[in-house]
Image: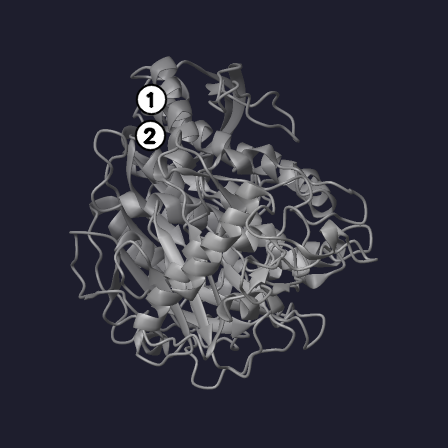
Amino acid sequence: MKHTLFAMILVAMMLLAGCVGSVDNDDEYDEDGTPPPPVFDGETPAEIVAVPHTEGCDSLSSVHCMLPFPSDAFLRADESTETGWRVNYSANTLPASGSVDIVEIPALNRLDGMSPSTEIMTAFAQAPVLTDVANQHSIATSLEDGHPTILLNLNTGERVAHWVELDARADSPEDTIVFIRTLGPLDANTAYGVGMSGMGLTPSTAFAAFLAGNITDAPDIEARRDSLGDLVTALDAEGHDESNLKAAWMFRTASLDSMLGGILSMRADALDRLGEDGINCTITSVQSDWLSDTENDFRLIKGTYTVPQYLEWQNPPSRISRDDNGTPQFVENAEIPFTMMIPQSLADANESGPLTIFGHGFLGQGEYYGENLVHGWAQAYNVPFIATDLLGWSYTDVDTIAFGLFDPSYFEHQADRLQQMLVNHLALARTFGGVCANLEEYENDEGTMLVDSRDILYMGYSLGGIYGASITAFSPDIDRAALWVGGSGFSSFIERSTNYERFDEGFAHSTAYPARNDRAVLIAVCQQMWDASDPETWLQFAELGDGDTVTPFRFLSTISINDAQVPGISADRSARASGAFVLSNSSHLPYGVPITEGNFSEGSVIVYWDGGYDAMPETNAAPPMADSGKAHNEIGPIAQVNAMVEHFLHTGTIIDTCDGPCVFDYDTDQAEW
């Protein structure tokens, strides 16, 4: 009641501009410009607590403008949206860099809430003591009564499982970020409350004043007084008594329409323009025996295919062309490069193999087939591979990403190219399953068509294993995918990857963002732009699809334990996001993921293989660069792993080839190819 009372007093003060009673000193101000406290008729002067505040910031934490994150301090009411809210980052909200004074990203304020895949974080003047707090290995304790942290679904009243860690990259013990790690995506269009109790913490000035029932001079605190009061009441009912509460805040997640409305409109328009068979493809070169040290190279075909484009222009940096409402607009039909490889095994067997789209690695390119492993897969599996660039994280995007370290607005360009990438792959499947399904270049000397485009498959490795789920969900022509060493929730795992380290020094440069907390917050903000293409958004459609828009699909996810490039927590997230099962003999059984035996064909499956590699840091500290590719790369040629993947691609059934626990020895278990 005390929260409500003071809220009523505050509103009256604002509406009547000081007419509720009298004000001492005839409205004279102190020397520092602070107005005197109001005196209400017959009452003790109300205490107004001075709180450090900057317009466009959240005053609940004095450590950083954007902490806690995410927060409803950065939302405004908007009846035109599905959630009734809209993101409201001011011109000064996002941290300035050493090169750019004002960072504005227009795409963010089109959203009607925060990312369901968001990182959750805050900071205090001192680091919290995490004794008896859930970590990666004790997640279930986060749901117990008395746990120091709570993540509460305010729509349902249910507690949400999570784990907690300190920022291992912090500049100093003071002001260290504490992360509340979700296990996968939160529900869309949902209100969440966060509470933190005990842990040796001291609440911020603003939060302490609120708990004491005092009015502050921070407009954003007073505007949320009622909602904060309701949250504190809800947390109290869950055992977080306000006498021990150190921090609490709310946020609302965006609706699926807000996150996917734009890209789904691109998809619908592209499918309409592509028709049932695609538009066209053009062959520019055909090579045979292009590698001197292998017999797997029957034919390499290069060319272009026609794709509806929504980017303002093709070369990066480039954003999606949008109308005044933010709806993507068709720009032109563009010719996009592709590369197809037909293995010698198909030519020798005089038979066709299912066309398989291949997804390349981080900052790679679709036309690069220099790795013998790719030829080995094609030869062993009897499949022709076709590939194009994974725009957004391809070799052509390196400069845009580098620019983004100094001016984060460039990440809008990068994120938009990821969305166009999905359209490009949709068109790839449709075109080569249609108008370019039976080209004479696919024939061997016997006149046999070696490429079977009736059932197009997908296989991706590393980055291709990550975004393969998005590509498969986005395309109505692909229903099965083999995903090697992938995951989901890009912002939650990026700092745990050795691939991040090539950018870390530049990101921390004095001309970029030397303050650690700035970098941490910006990575979290980027997730709001990545959501439209992140597999975590699309994996939720794997089992049931989404009406007539997204069709169901199945995948086999192959994970290497102690991977330094795509960390295991991202694989865990992808399994939970999709409702996949974990194979019973898997070397890791993630919390909350159901278990299945082999000979499984009813859903998707994730399998963790242990090659005995050195353990990676469990924190978000930089993983060791030495031998960083071992666990990530050396699982690729393992015979028993490939037997499982090959069988799934050809039949859709997951068989258990582990022969007991899913382990391997790189030196003895490689396939002959």
Q: How many marks?
A: 2
Q: Is residue 213 visible?
A: yes
> What coloring was used for the rendering?
one colour
Task: Residue 110 in the image: state x and y as whole percent.
Answer: 50, 33
Q: Of label 2 and label 1, which has the lower sequence position?
A: 1
Q: Is residue 463 above or below residue 316?
A: below
Q: Residues within 10 Å of mark 1 (few under 14, many from 20)?
A: some
Between marks 2 and 1, how big is the CA–CA gap? 8 Å
Quarter the N terminus occupies: bottom left
Task: Residue 166 in the image: state x and y as whole percent.
Answer: 56, 73
Residue drawn at the location 59% of the way across and 20% of the way down: 312
Answer whether labels 2 and 1 touch (C-beta < 8 Å): yes
Label 2, on which residue? 451
Amino acid at dot 2: Val
* Element carrying mark 2: strand
Q: Is residue 218 left or right of residue 144?
A: right
Residue drawn at the location 68% of the way across and 60% of the way down: 52
